[in-house]
Image (cartoon, helix red, strand yellow):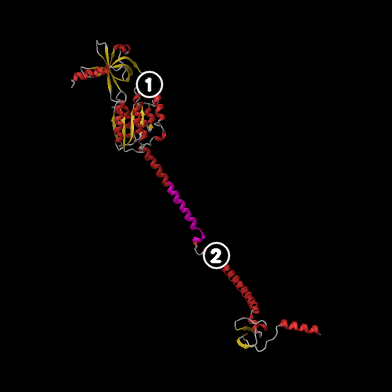
Amino acid sequence: MLTVREVSQQIGDYLGRLGAVWVEGEVAEVTLRPGSAMAFIRLKDTSADISLQVTCHRSLLENGEPLPPNARIVAYAKVNWYAVRGTLSLMAREIRQVGIGELLARLEALKTLLASEGLFALDRKKDLPFLPRKIGLICGRASAAEKDVVENVLRRWPGMAFEIKEVAVQGSQAVVEVSQALKELAKDSEVDVIIITRGGGSFEDLLPFSDESLIRLVATIKTPIVSAIGHEQDCPLLDLVADFRASTPTDAAKKVVPSLEEEVERTHLLTQRLNKRINSIIDLEIQKISALSSRPVLKDPQVLITSRAEVTFQLLNRSRKSFKAILQEARTELKEVRARVRSLSPQSTLDRGYAVIQRSSGELVRSPNDVKHGELVQLRLAKGEVGAQITKQGQSKSESENQTTKKEKRK
């Protein structure tokens, strides 16, 4: 079992074997003690609530003067463990302040990266609600931007509800506090739009609103977000990822709520247009009814019948005449056909005194050779039938003609 002192010494020995590293951060505090050759800097991460103590010789600072507030520096330092107190610090060997040119280059590279991932694409931006139930506002503490937004919103739409989160809008804590406030507002189901705003400032003051972690967080929020950072010429990356960019806090107030007076006036104009349209439709229908009622058929409903009665009677007479003519022609034709049929009928032959001879089997007798002597036959007369018996069998006409011809030849 080890004592606290032994554990602290072993930690110091392990960290002592580590080499020097380059560390980048934002200066949160610089302490210069009178009569001391050392300077103490509290270096914070710009995206997290983490800080480290950096110790350096006073001569490393420019002209021995403290660094400007919120300055970004790069320090070449070695990890130092103070075993007595159990604290970790960095012993800086070299300190360089990050210039604006380098920051601009980094921002441009970050902008290109985020754009390639589609975070600035127009198709992912959400529409602002016409009239939100509650407005989420992220701003500085007692800032003029907060006053501008609230006053202009209430002037345009009195009684609008707000959920205000006052946070640090510059410095090392800005990214952490703005991100936390954004997460809290995104969880509020009544907040329909979120405004992130602050007044103008230097390039370094607006850097937190171009932080990569904050930009990626804004891209994941489902609630529409309005960015109102600085003035028209200022353009942090938050303006590109937000659903709407307002040039000023006042402009943001005008975009998130409609003007009550303008809506009342618009409603009045629409009402007038609707009344005119309805009256126009009614007048048009009245004109149509008047035009219809002035027609003869509506003045005297029977005029339609009487005007067509004569035509109907004429057509009826024509149809009757035509039908009679067709019937007469058909009767005449029928008589002619009947006469032809009767003339060709066997009954007419029987009526002239002829008879039809049939054998008992029903076969017609056409020649004397078709029957035998004594055979019973049936005679069909014009009016009925009688039976008969063949008592004499003569010759057929062809045989008789043949015999006559032979006699003539003999002579």
Res. 107 in view: yes
Q: Locate the C terminus by quadrant.
A: bottom right
Which amino acid does the dot numbered 2 rest on?
A: Arg
Magenta stretch: residue 38 in it? no
From the image, give the main secondary structure of the stretch colored magenta: helix
Compare residues 346 and 194 and report the one nearer the observer.
Answer: 346
Name above or below for residue 313 compared with residue 192. below
Q: Secondary structure at mark 2?
A: helix
Left or right position of 162 against 408: left
Q: Amino acid at mark 1?
A: Leu
Residue 54: which numbered mark, if any? none
Q: Quadrant of residue 81?
A: top left
Residue closer to the observer: 349 or 272? 349
Alpha-carbon distance for marks 2 and 1? 97 Å
Quadrant occupied by the N terminus: top left
- Of 410 and 245, the residue lying toward us: 410
Q: Residue 275 appears at what percent x and percent y?
A: 41, 47
Q: Is residue 292 magenta?
A: yes
Asked where in the image residue 236 lies, by quadrant, the reply is: top left
- Residue 193 in percent (x, y) is at 33, 35
* Mark 2 or 1, closer to the camera: 1
How many numbered callouts? 2
Q: Residues within 10 Å of mark 2 (few under 14, many from 20)?
A: few
Residue stretch in magenta: 276-298
Residue 206 in view: no
| SS label for mark 1 | helix
Q: Residue 358, position in %: x, y?
A: 62, 83
Residue identifier under label 1 = 103
Percent of width and height locating residue 328 = 62, 74
Q: Which mark is residue 308?
A: 2
| Quadrant assignment, res 336 | bottom right
